[in-house]
Image: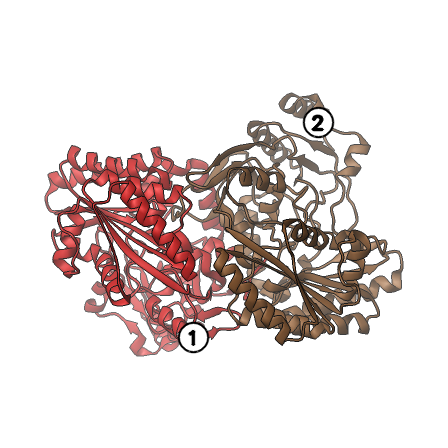
Chain colours: A brown, B red
Amino acid sequence: MISPALLKEFRVVLGHENVLTDMADLVTYSYDAAVLEPVVPAIALRPVSGKALSQVVRLCNENRLPLTVRGAGTNLSGGTIPSPEGVVVLTNALNKILEINPEDMYAVVQPGVVTAQLAASVEAQGLFYPPDPGSQAVSTIGGNVAENAGGLRGLKYGVTRDYVMKLEFFDVNGEPVITGSKTVKCATGYNLAGLLVGSEGTLGVFNEITLKLIPPPASQKAMFAVFDHIDKASETVAAIIANRIVPATLEFLDNFTIRAVEDFSRAGLPVDAAALLLIEVDGHPAQVEEDAAKVESLCRKMGATSIRVAKDAAERDKVWEARRSALSALAKLKPTVVLEDATVPRSKIPDMVRAMQNISRKFDILIGTFGHAGDGNLHPTILTDRRDKAEWQRVESAIDAIFDKALALGGTLSGEHGIGTAKSHYLEKETGKATIVYSRRIKAALDPNNILNPGKIIGY
Amino acid sequence: MISPALLKEFRVVLGHENVLTDMADLVTYSYDAAVLEPVVPAIALRPVSGKALSQVVRLCNENRLPLTVRGAGTNLSGGTIPSPEGVVVLTNALNKILEINPEDMYAVVQPGVVTAQLAASVEAQGLFYPPDPGSQAVSTIGGNVAENAGGLRGLKYGVTRDYVMKLEFFDVNGEPVITGSKTVKCATGYNLAGLLVGSEGTLGVFNEITLKLIPPPASQKAMFAVFDHIDKASETVAAIIANRIVPATLEFLDNFTIRAVEDFSRAGLPVDAAALLLIEVDGHPAQVEEDAAKVESLCRKMGATSIRVAKDAAERDKVWEARRSALSALAKLKPTVVLEDATVPRSKIPDMVRAMQNISRKFDILIGTFGHAGDGNLHPTILTDRRDKAEWQRVESAIDAIFDKALALGGTLSGEHGIGTAKSHYLEKETGKATIVYSRRIKAALDPNNILNPGKIIGY
């Protein structure tokens, strides 16, 4: 319960209009994109300055109020679901790009800046911010950093972690912790920025984020290759990587996903294909020509029935938009959509794709598989109806089977969606007990009252 | 004091021959490459297996014995100097490359593997491990990870941190903590690997390190540009970066360093030059040609008096060997050599180079300046004699002035050498108090008896 005195204090710190207690508002902040029970918070707060944010954190700690920071709520593992009687802290008023420095190639932003807006602003200055999570049109940089968001370009360009140079965040007392530097190299103090990236709001609250920018590639070429058997497509992925070609993007779609996407986006995808690879190479024009030719020849050698090269930027954009719509397209088909992201070493993609087909058959459930095959990060997407208890039990068994297979292949539970609450009970299977004990020691030391997004990643 | 019972236990765990108590041995492990007082440990232990290593850690913790892991002892900030009455744990028997996986492009190594040996083994399989600290011929991967070692290629290829995919280490109880994955992407659990990299042995003891490998560049071109004024050289560095060219290496040498290196290596460097830039571009041959032409034209525009392109690999290697000998060459000139690595945003290199000349004049001390100018990471090297008390005081004032200037320019205390004990009292100036408090909370939680390389980075 939030006492009237505390409510008053929040209003003084934030202004009346930034303290939300209406049920209609609170319900909006009760869920994210994971298939989990919503939890309605007690209050939602919208700080408009770093100072106000710091005070909110301090007040929550002093009053033992669990606090969950919320960007756009696109989280796929429950990381944004608040605690019962907890506080949701909104970052949408902390949405300023504070600096884009083209000389030293970095950007300084507040946590609520929308990913795609940053990317566009950076592009306008002739630079490139590569991480491009599927939700980039609405997701925030703060959320991306908290989740270590990936995206389609992870294969060549890495993920959010690889772009965080410096991080200013508040500890649980609202004190400012500064880690990293605007310099290209930094070996000063503990790499707290590295620890905070992907910590899902459990160790601190971001105030200012400095991101590395890079020169954009001089040219690109996108193509799609059609396969009449799913194995041929997955083996082509492994072959491209084994041939030391590093495409900017190398995406896989199975027939089920292709049909759903085409139905949704009308992008002209071949609905009869057993599987499709969407490939983009970029870099120096000569490199692009060579890589594209190599990729094309590999695809043919591995049995692609046809290959289509996007003839211009418009056609290219159309293909990528279609790919980005995959989750939305699949989500239309059934009431409940479970999007997983178990990830395997890249050479194991053919095994993983086969395993997914077996799991779908064995548990008699619908799985559309697509994703970032080039980096081993598939998104098996289970279409179901959670109200159907019998089927839901089979879904849960299938998810167990997917994780077991990924781990058996030397993989990991999550490539980019995080652990949240959805996967925290699987964590020990991958890391062993000592890793969780070690992690909990850190959490308890930094957040002794357990108010920073409690329960996420390492449970309670 | 190590009790006879504990000594016996160490001998059982490790074998008699791996428990070293001779003063001649112990003195060898009393210092590293930083200018600090040596500290003779009570004992040195050489585990030959992960299991033995784990037991050593556990025994040290149970007996409250401070433990310092030592690779090659090339540390430049005192991180390898043991505690009085402490234990040195040697990794030279843990020197196996456990796996090089060319398909999924990673290597798994024990901490005692020598950097250059790994690089050569990887190269033999047609792959590339980029981090190349100056001490790579003897430094170990474990030491590189503990210090987040950089090197000449940091500008384009990043530093050790960017290559650690997975880390298995022992917590202070000797329990195995597993973090990261052999997959390209991983968002599973806290990024403990990120935290451990650069933690200077204070949070855990490495057992197995999985490193990312990449395809090697198809071609390279190295050149050196001669300048008759130091400012012209430093401004050329800023101009190259501002023109969005990312060389693999972009090194700076002032006249003092050039003469010392030439005297030492006879590589044919122009001893009359005020400053020299050593530049290598790599990548696709067409890219290399274009970048090399652009760099050459920029150098001329900025006033280079001559530019020499290495005509073959032999000539190129000769230049790089000469550059790598800079520290040794300078070290010959005076009894005491202090190598700093304050780092600034790249556009500030001209300011930093000028500041170094002023500091040298103001405090009347010899400073040779060279280093990784392309990533803002200069190595001002002070030549002195520590026994000369008056001069040593001026040296200490000069070091203060160097750090103050770097911070004033938006830089950092250390680009790649770490904080150790040499710079820990400067840390608060850069990060503020709360960052140190936050870091100490982590340290105290993970190492309650403060036995893991105590005093390093965050003091006591």
Considering the numbered disc 1 on the image, is that residue within a helix, a strand or a loop? loop
Q: Nearer the viewer, residue A16 or B105?
A: B105
**Which residue: 75% across, 35% down?**
A42
Considering the numbered disc 2 on the image, is that residue within a helix, a strand or a loop? strand
Q: Nearer the viewer, residue A41 or B374?
A: B374
- Name the residue furthest front: A311
Kindly identify the amino acid type of the residue bearing the numbered disc 2: Val
Relative to A12, say whether B398 is above or below.
below
Q: Which of marks 1 and 2 is in front?
A: 1
- Residue A326 occupies quadrant: bottom right
Kindly identify the amino acid type of the residue bearing the numbered disc 1: Gln
Q: Where is residue B438 in the image (x, y as percent from the top left)?
A: 48, 42
Parent chain of label 1: B
Q: Which of B77 and B362 is in front in this view?
A: B362
Parent chain of label 2: A
Task: Please rate how many residues cluster around mark 2, counting C-alpha atoms within 10 Å: few if below 14, some from 14 to 19, many from 20.
Answer: many
- Residue B112 occupies quadrant: bottom left
On residue B125, which mark appears?
Answer: 1
**Which residue: 61% across, 49% down?**
A132
Q: Position of residue A76 (x, y in %)?
A: 70, 51
Q: Position of residue A49 (x, y in %)?
A: 58, 27
Q: Name the residue under label 2.
A: A19
**Which residue: 20% across, 67% down?**
B23
Q: Which corner quadrant holds the N terminus of chain A?
A: top right
